[in-house]
């Protein structure tokens, strides 16, 4: 993880490029620690979240998280564990805006992280994907964020099919604010940050708090309806992880 200050703007950079910034437990903790540090620093007003290398974030690290035994998954309460903090933005105190600057891939957990941010700048050709349904898991939280930004059945389509879609398609449906060449991505995010900095910070934070409250509350409700299903203990979940690692087509049995 890289944490860089530039005036009132903080750059938080996922830095596991050799794995396309796949999120293992350490990376998730580092991201959230960085977000909490930003939230507590009175000199910082806006954060820009991006990824080093060829991708923003290619999703959860399957080798670590999804190849656990059923006994481990039962004890942990899921691939991420009961105590995992996978959305530090939901736990903010000062409600400062965060801009995602994404390129390459924003898949699964990376998709969730980008859509949890308040604004999104995407490089041309960036691929987005809600992967959970293909992994045998519920994608309710991702559907909520997608529906909030798009307000259309497009959210249903990408949550139920698990298909990839491009930055250009995401822009068409209102999921990203800017689509620019990769070389201009950070500059475009910094330009948005500069516009925000022209406004009174307390008013900005009030708006951020209201926007996040709606999404966070709906996501909390979605977890209530799906956690009890225990999908992380299903045979289909295990089969999906094995097939991914073995680079073959999964065979699902509905159990």
Image (cartoon, rainbow, N blue to C red):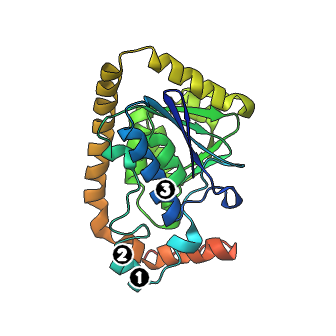
Q: Position of residue 246 (x, y in %)?
A: 68, 77
Residue ID at (48%, 75%): 236
In the foreground, 123 or 148? 123
Residue 244, quarter of the rendered image: bottom right
Q: Residues within 10 Å of mark 2 (few under 14, many from 20)?
A: some
The image quarter in which residue 247 lies:
bottom right
Q: Quadrant of the C terminus?
A: bottom left
As helix, strand or loop, the secondary structure at mark 2 comes to helix
Quick check: can you spot residue 240?
A: no
Looking at the image, residue 223 sits to the left or right of residue 250; the answer is: left
- Circle 2 is placed at which residue position? 76
Q: Is residue 64 above or below residue 218?
A: below
Secondary element type, mark 3: helix
Q: Earlier in the sequence, mark 3 or mark 1?
A: 3
Instruction: Name the residue: 65% across, 71% down.
Output: 249
Judge left or right: residue 86 versus residue 238: left
Name the residue tied to disc 1. Answer: 72
Q: CA distance from mark 2 to mark 1?
A: 6 Å
User: CA–CA distance between discs 3 and 1?
Assistant: 23 Å
């Amino acid at each position: 993880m890289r944490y860089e200050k530039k005036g009132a703007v903080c750059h938080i950079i996922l830095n596991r490029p050799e794995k396309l910034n796949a999120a293992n437990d350490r990376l998730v903790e580092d991201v959230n620690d960085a977000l909490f540090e930003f939230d507590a620093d009175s000199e910082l007003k806006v954060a820009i979240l991006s990824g080093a290398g060829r991708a923003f974030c290619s999703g959860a690290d399957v080798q670590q998280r999804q190849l656990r035994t059923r006994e481990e998954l039962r004890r942990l309460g899921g691939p991420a564990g009961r105590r995992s903090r996978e959305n530090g933005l939901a736990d903010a105190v000062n409600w400062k805006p965060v801009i995602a600057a994404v390129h390459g891939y924003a898949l699964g957990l990376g998709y969730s992280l980008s859509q949890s941010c308040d604004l999104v700048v995407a490089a041309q050709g960036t691929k987005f994907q809600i992967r959970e349904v293909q992994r045998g898991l519920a994608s309710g939280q991702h559907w909520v964020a997608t529906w909030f930004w798009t307000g259309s059945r497009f959210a249903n389509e990408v949550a139920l099919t698990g298909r990839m879609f491009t930055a250009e398609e995401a822009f068409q449906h209102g999921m990203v604010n800017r689509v620019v060449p990769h070389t201009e991505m950070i500059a475009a995010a910094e330009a948005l940050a500069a516009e925000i900095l022209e406004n009174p910070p307390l008013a900005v934070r009030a708006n951020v708090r209201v926007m996040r409250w709606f999404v966070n509350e709906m996501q909390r409700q979605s977890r209530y309806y799906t956690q009890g299903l225990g999908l992380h203990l299903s045979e289909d979940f295990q089969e999906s992880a094995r097939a991914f690692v073995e680079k073959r087509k999964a065979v699902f049995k509905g159990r």
